[in-house]
Each structure stands twice: as C-alpha cells, then as structure tokens.
Amino acid sequence: MMDVEQCIAKGLLRKDVPDKEKVKKSLAISEKKLAKANKMQGLGLFEDALVNCYVSMFHAGRALLFRDGIREKSHFGLWVYLNEKFQGIIEKRFLNELNALRLERHQISYGLDETDVGKERSEDAIKTAMGFLVAVKKLVGA
C-alpha cells in the first residue's frame, strides 16, 4: 500500500499552503453534491445519486487537505492521505466507504460493464456521505 510520502514523490499529492477559503468552498461543493444526491435518489437515479455521494465525500475530504496545506492530484492520493493522517480521528467506516465509492464511481463513469446500483445502496451512500461531512465540518471548525 502506498503511503503519503510515496504519493508526494509520485506527484499524486503535493505540499501547498493551507487555505481557509478553499476549505469553505470545498465544503460548500460537498453540501451541494449531497443535496443533488438526495434529489437523484428521489428520482430513482441511483447511480447518479451514488456518484454525487462520492463527489460530496471527495470535496469534504479535500477540505481537510486544504486545511493541512496539501493539494491532491489524484482521487487515490486523497484517499491515501485521509486514510493515513486521520486514522482514529475519522471513523474507519467513512474512510472505507470513501474508497469503495471511489471505485464504484470509476466503474460507473469509465467501466465497460453495466453497473446495477440499487435504492438501498444509494440510500446507504447518502447516509454515509452525510455523516462524513458532519465529521469533517467538526474537524475544520465549520
């Protein structure tokens, strides 16, 4: 498994200056994508709901990187950073779901095989994304 220093060396992450304004903007995007996930869920567009849950979690996670002065250059790098730096701070279930959604979003968006995301799966993703956003907001003081 790659660690943060390896991600930096490979260009998947890079050091930057902490940026409170980007933290706020990323949280706002996270909230907007979560609202969109709920709307898609209500329309029965479960794959779209799931993708928006992932994007919500990605931007919430990005807020932590902006706070810490790290810039992601890959979705995988963001997950590695959060998984390493927030062990025991963010519930493991959130970090596991972020990675699972990352992989599912990739398959939905780029895969050649049909995906079948059901109502229950997208509902679970929405609940998890909401919990993750709440946890991140506490960490950044929002």
Image (cartoon, grey):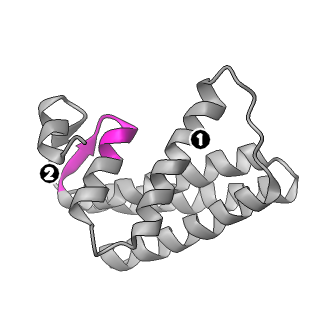
Instruction: Check if mark 1's residue and mark 2's residue have beta carbons within 8 Å.
Output: no
Q: Is residue 70 visible?
A: yes
Q: Which residues are magenta?
A: 69-78
Q: Which residue is drawn at the image coordinates 59% and 41% (left, top)?
A: 104
Between 52 and 110, the one nearer to me in the picture? 110
Q: Residues within 10 Å of mark 1 (few under 14, many from 20)?
A: some
Q: Which residue is drawn at the image coordinates 48% and 69% (left, top)?
A: 132
Q: Position of residue 20 (x, y in %)?
A: 27, 62
Q: Which residue is drawn at the image coordinates 67% and 50% (left, top)?
A: 50
Corner quadrant of residue 31: bottom right
* Front position among marks 1 and 2: 1
Q: Position of residue 136 (x, y in %)?
A: 39, 70
Farthest right residue in view: 43
Element marked by disc 2: loop
Q: Which residue is mark 1?
A: 104
Please tell me the numbered disc located at residue 17. 2
Q: CA distance from mark 1 to mark 2?
A: 31 Å
Name the amino acid type tagged 2: Val
Figure check: 80 above or below 141: above
